[in-house]
Every structure is written in C-alpha cells, then in structure tokens.
C-alpha cells in the first residue's frame, strides 16, 4: 500500500528454497495459454483430451522446473566467486541502460537459446 516508497528486504535463497511459488505461477500461466489451445485448436484431433501421457508430461515439467531452480541456487555462489571479477561490469551497465522491454526480449532469447541447446543435447546424446 506504500507504492514505490516501500522498502523491500533482500531475498536470500538457500539450497532448501526451490521457489515453489514460481512453479505454481508457471503452471497457471501455461495452463491459461495452452488448455484453450488444446481444446479449440488441437494438433491431433483424434487424441483424447486427457491422454495417459499427461501424467508423464506433468512429472517432467515439475522435475525440470525444480531442477533448474535448484541448480541456479546451488551454482550462484561458486559462479559469483569464480567470475565475479572478470570485468563484466561494462557489459552489465550497458545492458542495464537499455529500455526494460529490450532487456526482457534479450533475456528471453538468451534463455531460450540455452534451453534449446540443452534440449538438442538430450535428444542427440544417450545418457544411459
């Protein structure tokens, strides 16, 4: 209720904190987008709406999101320690000076690129 005058304390995540709130928000947002698409414009019209594979999809979704969040928390301190002083401040200040929308699009493109690369890696390499 204080608008921009409210001070926000720093949020420190620990290894035990997996940001389940973001997982739930992500599930909600994706549901709002994709459930209507699947109902009104399905790619496979003959497929039932609640096919048996939906449980597998839900498990993969949860595990992948939790694994990404856990990994981010675990590698934050070592990454800051190892590359904290490599001189990225000019790049950071340059990107920070760009409009928010440009930063958002850039962040989405970079994140999508790495997610695509990981996805391709998993399909092209046999782990077991």
Image (cartoon, rainbow, N blue to C red):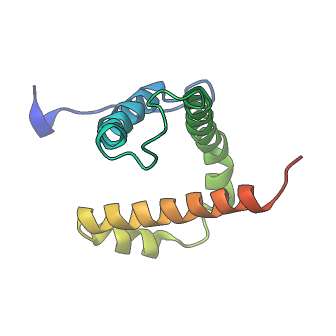
Residue 24 in the image, given as x and y percentages of width and height: 41, 27
Quick check: 10 left or right of 73?
Answer: left
The front one of 84 and 25 is: 25
101 in relation to 8, above or below: below
Residue in view at x 66 percent, y 58 percent: 118
Of residues 99 and 113, the one drawn nearer to the viewer in this rendering: 113
Q: Is residue 107 left or right of residue 123?
A: left
Which percent across, then down, holds residue 27?
41, 32
Residue at x-position 32% and y-position 47% = 41
Residue at image coords 39%, 67%:
106
In the image, taking residue 74 as reference, residue 23 lies left or right, namely left
Quarter of the rendering containing residue 26: top left
Compare residues 2 and 42 and report the one nearer the observer: 42
Query: Which quarter shows the N terminus?
Result: top left
Q: Position of residue 13 (x, y in %)?
A: 52, 32
Q: Position of residue 117 (x, y in %)?
A: 63, 64
Residue at the image position 35 percent from the left and 31 percent from the top: 28
């Amino acid at each position: 209720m204080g608008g921009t005058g409210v001070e926000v304390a720093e949020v420190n995540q620990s290894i035990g904190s997996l940001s389940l709130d973001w997982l739930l928000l992500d599930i909600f947002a994706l549901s709002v987008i994709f459930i209507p698409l699947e109902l009104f414009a399905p790619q496979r019209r003959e497929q039932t709406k609640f096919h048996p594979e939906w449980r597998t999809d839900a498990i993969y979704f949860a595990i992948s999101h939790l694994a990404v969040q856990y990994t981010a928390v675990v590698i934050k301190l070592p990454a800051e320690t190892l590359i904290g002083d490599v001189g990225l401040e000019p790049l950071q200040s340059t990107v920070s000076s760009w409009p928010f929308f440009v930063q958002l699009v850039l962040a989405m493109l970079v994140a999508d690129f790495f997610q695509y690369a990981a996805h391709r890696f998993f399909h092209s390499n046999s782990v077991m």
